[in-house]
Amino acid sequence: MEDGKPVWAPHPADGFQLGTIVDIGANSLTIEPLKQGQKVGDHMSCSLMYLNEATLLNNIRVRYSKDKIYTFVANILIAVNPYVDLPKLYAPETIKQYHGRSLGTLPPHVYAIADKAYRDMRVLKMSQSIIVSGESGAGKTENTKFVLRYSSSTRLLWLRLLLIEPVLSGQNTVVGGFVSHYLLEKSRICQQSQEERNYHIFYRLCAGASEDIRTKFHLESPDAFRHLKAGPLKDPLLDDQGDFNRMCGAMKKIGLDDTEKLDLFRVVAGVLHLGNIDFEEAGSTSGGCTIKNQSSQTVEYCAELLGLEESDLRVSLTSRVMLTTAGGAKGTVIKVPLKVEQANNARDALAKAVYSRLFDHVVTRVNQCFPFDSSANFIGVLDIAGFEYFEHNSFEQFCINYCNEKLQQFFNERILKEEQELYQKEGLGVNEVHYVDNQDCIDLVEAKLVGILDILDEENRLPQPSDQHFAETVHNKHKNHFRLTVPRKSKLQVHRNVRDDEGFIVRHFAGAVCYETTKFVEKNNDALHMSLECLVSESKDRFIRDLFENSINAKDSKQKAGKLSFISVGNKFKTQLNILLEKLRSTGSSFIRCIKPNLKMVSHQFEGAQILSQLQCSGMVSVLDLMQGGFPSRAPFHELYNMYKQYMPAKLTRLDPRLFCKALFKALGLNENDYKFGLTRVFFRPGKFKEFDQIMKSDPDHLAELVKKVNQWLICSRWKKVQWCSLLRNKMMYRASACIKMQKTVRMWLCRRKHKPRIDGLVKVRNLKNRMDKFNKVIAGLKEGKQEMSKQIHELDAAINATMVKIKTTVMTRMDIDHEYQALVTRSEQLLTAMQNKKKQEEEKERLKKIQEEMEREKNRREEEEQRRKQEGDDRRLKLSLQAEMDVQLEAEREEEAVRQNILEQERRDRELAMRIAQSEAELIPEESQNDAGLRRGPQVQATKAAAAAGTKKYELSKWKYAELRDAINTSCDIELLAACREEFHRRLKVYHAWKSKNKKRGNDTGNTEQRAPKSVTDYAQANPAPPIPARQHEVAMNRQQRYFRIPFIRPGDQYKDPQNKKKGWWYAHFDGPWIARQMELHPDKQPILLVAGKDDMEMCELSLEETGLTRKRGAEILPRQFEEIWERCGGIQYLRSAIESRQARPTYATAMLQSLLK
């Protein structure tokens, strides 16, 4: 790729444009379009110098501009719809030109495909199929007409085949002289899109019917009928009035008399009038509906045209009849009124049923006009609806696109897959062409049980089927299927508005299509309800009764079988489609791909992007890749021999077919790249078989020259054969001597294979025997069991000797020798292990004996030491006890003396006061002589001592043990006792930590000091000792208010560092009342530290809430939610739970809340 070179560049409107490269970037190319002049197109796309989708599109564009609408891609014909009449292209003289001419000899034409199918049928003795495919409006029906015109054997049959086209407007297949239809789009009768018209017969009848017919059938202009005015009333490319006259002539020529034509027109008019019936809500409480007064005349017309009673028609359209089988007498008839929507559906169902039966009747009458009974072979022409995708797609588009998926798969198999398999089987060495296999899309539709059609049938069998439930089931069954997705993932905004239960998207070979499932269930069951079935079966008109006679019989049999055995429209279509594909696979195939040049369907307008998309979807690009290196024309050797042996002399006809063909090709001097010899046939490049045929059928002089060349080639080939035979003889002799040498080598190898294992086995067993000295050394070191071990060694030595004798005297395989050797090795290892274990046991026994003696000595020493320590302890405790008793006695005496002195001092002061008041000593009362002992025993002194002894404490807990305090805290229900126990417990903690801090070694590093709370908290507690809590405030404190705090935490080791290098953390605390319940430390360089009361008391803060001063710190208190989030994130719940399960956690508010959650 160089600057300035012309290249094809993608274009959004034209598909591809020719341009020159002006700049090459890292990820892009800058291309300037060229101004192209008029170019000459090649009628064979495979003959182009560069074969790709861009050159194919350009070739079709150039030919289309010259009204050359046909192009060949190998043997596949591409037909572009010109949307204009080209009479010279299909003149009778043109038909004569293509009689008996091979593909490529004349310009591409639909007649060439028809002639090829006819010649293949005669030569190969095999039926042929011509498959005409393409989108709607691509010209499939017109090309089918031209194929039928060419294939007709007589003038009369040709006229009849062409005349049936104005009569039939549905989809159909022509097989010899028989017409069968597969899917009539009945929904088009009642509903069309804005761009579509209804079936042609309606417009033709309204435009071309005579005045008598119009009056008799009450016909008006098309815009007066609901079934016609939804779409365009006039098609500029069609002449409805002229087409009506032509259709009447065609009916007459295929055998329909005036009575039958009037019957057809009458039924068509009745269908039109049915669409004009309107309904309204009934005024009664029954909830039904009635026919509007404005539609009374229309109802009368419908009853007249269809031979029905007007009153019965009214009742059947506004109600339906049900037969009960439970809850009443069997067979009881119940009349159910219909709502307006249900009545509209019943009206449309009747119109579609009548038109469908009429269409079936017309097809039957058409088949009766053909002079065709049977034939050994036939040419089938398939004209079926092309791939359809509209803004709103329903059940009909689903079935049509499913059919196109099957046909595309058949195209892939016949053109791509089978072609490549044939190349591989014949050994041509053509490169493989990859294509997209759509089998998964077909399985999505037709797979058993999980296919969309089976899901739809199952929905129809439900008591209350619904389209929403059907769509939901489809999505649930195929959640991760590549081919199916929800509507909201569509590229179009209008489809994104469709809910998941209202539709689904299927990725077809031609693109993704969104199907709206509304009325899917209804359209899958084309049977009328009982009231309408009975109505039409009792029609006064014989023609109407005959139309519904067969369907009524089928209906009766289905009712007997039950609802679960009904035959749905989808399954019926699938069965017909499978039968069609079986026929196609049993015939030879020719393909005509019809292309729609523009969406507006106007002449001389070429939309490149639109056409390129159709070419890609139809598989033409894959065909180009295959044909570029392929050989589309081929012929078996024996057929070429039979075809051309009459031109050769008898001398050459005695050759076998393969040699005969090789001689011809060599003599003609054909380019070896234009053909290839397979195993059973010869393959030609496109158009090269034509050149070969022309040379063979040339003038006699040239033929004589050809025979001379064949003889020369035979002489040269035979001389070369002699040379090759001589070389082959030398080669055989060389191979014989080589075989002798190989025999010698093999014999030597066999001897080595036979005896080498025995030699290797003897070497290994002898090495094992040499290891017996090791056993003797081990036995020498044993003290016990020597005799038993020696006996086992002698047995092992005898077994080794016996094995060596056995190997020498008998022929043993390597496996047997290895087995014997492994048995000896195992036995020797077990024996050696046993001896080593024996020796270890003796050594271990000796060692244990020494250890036991040492332990005895140590035990005696420890007992003596313990006895000495016990004696010293008893002496020390006795001394302390005596000292304590003396201290208590002295303290009691001091207290008594102090009390006595206080009493005496008080009495002295009282006397002095009395003396000041009295005027003389005589007025004083004499003191009674009381000694000190009596005073000390007075009631006031005893009361004072009792009060002094009692103090302010209710409980004396200083003598309680730690276990008793813990059990009281965990189990007691006395609030005051609990408070006193907690206070005593934390007092002891303070004393313990103070003692521990005081007795630390002076040499310890202060950075390693344990820190249970931030330094700010401990400093505050030392500076502001909290007063004791009054006794009456204990009850208030025991309300256990839950408070949470967070303050910065600085390690002691970091307090003297640079402030930037201090590693700060956070200290979290949860206080349950005045005491801490949970504590958390978060440091940046280590895992979080979690502590709970009870399990981690020694590591937690021992200060009360008042002593910490946290309530006075601004911003220290946080919300419970903030604390719990950090606690849960750090794994606090699991930690607290494990403490509770191990019964190490003290009962607090946190434990109670966690236990309630776990319950």
Image: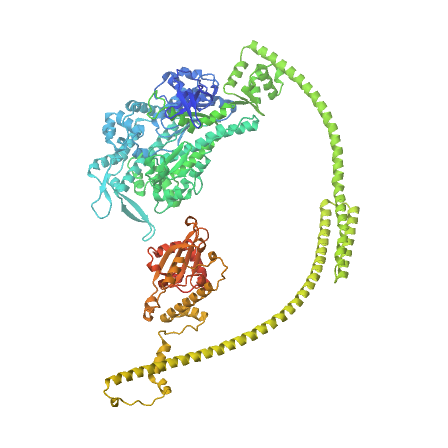
- Horizontally, residue 630 falls left or right of residue 1069, namely right
Report which quarter residue 214 is drawn in. top left
Furthest residue in direction front, as rendered: 920
Relative image position of residue 421 (x, y in whole percent) = 53, 29
Q: Is residue 545 visible?
A: no
Q: Is residue 957 left or right of residue 794?
A: left
Q: Is residue 131 above or below residue 832?
A: above
Q: Choose between 370 and 744: the one closer to the eye.
A: 744
Q: Position of residue 989 (x, y in %)?
A: 43, 66
Question: Picture coordinates of residue 1102 (x, y %)?
Answer: 41, 63
Q: Is 600 rendered above or below residue 900? A: above
**Left or right: where 749 falls relative to 1029:** right
Seen from the viewer's position, the closer of residues 463 and 1076 is 1076
Residue 244 locus on image (x, y percent): 30, 24
Q: Quadrant of residue 354?
A: top left
| Relative height, residue 723 to residue 1084 (above, below) | above
